[in-house]
Amino acid sequence: MKAGRLRGFSARVLATLLGLVPVAVFGQTVAVGSKNFNESYLLAEMSAQLLEQAGFEVRRRFGLGGTLICYGALNAGEIDLYVEYTGTLSQAILDMPVDTELPALRDAVAGRGLLLLPPLGFDNTYAMAMKRSRAEALGIESIGDLRGSDLRVVVSHEFHKRSDGWPGVAAAYDLDLAVTGIEHGLAYQALNDGSIDVTDAYSTDGEVIRYDLRLLEDDRDFFPEYLAVPMVRSDVPRGVIVALEQLGGRLDDDTMQALNSAVVFDKRSFADVANEFLAAEGLVTARAQGGVLWSSLLSNTLQHLKLTGAALGASVIVALMLALAVFRHRLLARGVIYFCGLLQTIPSIALLALMIPLFGIGLFPAIVALFLYSLLPTLRNTVSALTTVDPTLLRVAEAMGMTNAEQLRHVYVPLSLPSMLAGIRTAAVISIGTATLAAFIGAGGLGDPIVTGLALNDTGLILQGAVPAALLAIVTELLFEFIERLVLPGHLRPQT
């Protein structure tokens, strides 16, 4: 690893000396973000490769969960840019009319310390989609034709809630249909399988061609333009803007649809498809293409272990100290356990999102969220064990003249140790599973391939994250079983 970095460093020095990379750019790092659907990944990868060609170091923060998380990361300075869509920007972020023109959007974001660069050239508007054969059989051609039907409508989670999504569509077309949410990448497969009848689609998605979908006519012109535009912080180096402006106007609807299709159905990586397009346009140097399965699997697993290890270690220390401090005060102990239990009721992805305004994105906020989730099992088991120690043994300890500290050391802790270890064991398994969601705030780990696989509806990619995570949980169970056999007397070991 160090040798590879050294070679990369030497190459950049040589390029700088030869005048291929501007001296002002050398050593500067730019964080590029993306949302968690395939087109956003692809555009982010194009942006990253353009910046690398210009001599910048790039930190990829891909797969951030949804518009508000991505925009929040940009506002907080955790990323320097990502590609947004004008319709989404006006509705979901700026709360402006759907027909707001690009100059007005530029003025609005300028007040927030952001810049909108020239559009990339395509309009990825929303649409309502059905299987062509199903639509033809029912005579459905437009969104208005859905009125009065009993079709099964399932839309992506973000579209389900946004004003320019289903609530707006339903109001504009007077639709009274039961609608539920689904991950966007999975909706197309469900549509193709016949599990659902209607879903939302992006007009440039490769699935539109692959699954022979009909995009229902928007006969009331509800959906605005969704022009793809790079949105960057105004304090980025000038070279970032120059590099990204090269992509302006180069991607029309058909080209973007073909590129998306190459990723989704030809099973090619975002990096390979992006590089092939940019090299054909003469914007970057062509790179060797190929998979990096084992290296990415190792790095994701190590990152996952770092996440769970740090969170679990901190939670065990805090939970044990809290338990020992409050177990003699029953009301206080119940209050502390109740509070930690409330933390468990917050949905994992919501808790991760709440970390962004406080700690930004990446490793640290993910560790904080996992720490909070891991407190309850250890705390509850420890308090429960400490408060149920046999009173007879405690009276004997008092009769022997033991101090409170000696009672803790020689009576309470030894007798409570099996329950303590069981709580830590449970917390460890919970942490391993929950850590996969940390990818939504750019923390990496085994959630990365899962999130990407969901965006691409790629079962193999999902398994690249899910299987190692499951194996880690199994290894953790076996490790704790070994620890219990090592440190517990035979009569205190859990019976299996």
Image (cartoon, rainbow, N blue to C red):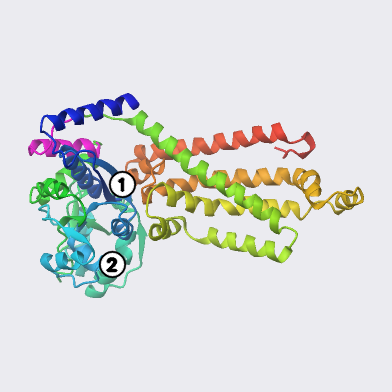
**Residue assigned mark 1:** 61
Bounds of the magenta span? Answer: 269-288
Q: Nearer the viewer, mark 2 or mark 1?
A: 1
Q: Is residue 29 above or below residue 161?
A: above
Secondary structure type for disc 2: helix
Q: Is residue 298 above or below residue 146?
A: above
Q: Is residue 74 above or below residue 272?
A: below
Would you call the spot at circle 2 few (<14 residues within 10 Å), some (14-19), or many (20 or more)?
Answer: many
Nearest to the observer: residue 454 or residue 103: 103
Residue at 41%, 40% (x, y): give it: 446
Residue at 52%, 46% (x, y): give it: 311
Q: Earlier in the sequence, mark 2 or mark 1?
A: 1
Mark 2 and 1 residues: CB-CB less than 8 Å, in contact?
no
Q: Going by the picture, which residue comes out furthest to the right?
A: 399
- Residue 274 belongs to magenta span: yes
The residues bearing labels 2 and 1 have C-alpha atoms spaced at a distance of: 29 Å
- Residue 324 belongs to magenta span: no
Q: Split into 4 quadrants, where in the image is the C terminus?
A: top right
Count numbered badges in the picture.
2
Secondary structure type for disc 1: strand
- Identify which amino acid the numbered label 1 is placed on: Arg
Q: Is residue 118 left or right of residue 469?
A: left
* Image location of residue 207, percent across then percent down: 22, 48
Q: Is residue 470 left or right of residue 375?
A: left
Question: Can the viewer see residue 374 in this picture?
Answer: yes
* Image location of residue 494, percent across then percent down: 72, 40
Question: Can the viewer see residue 154 in this picture?
Answer: no
**Residue assigned mark 2:** 166
Nearest to the observer: residue 47 or residue 466: 47
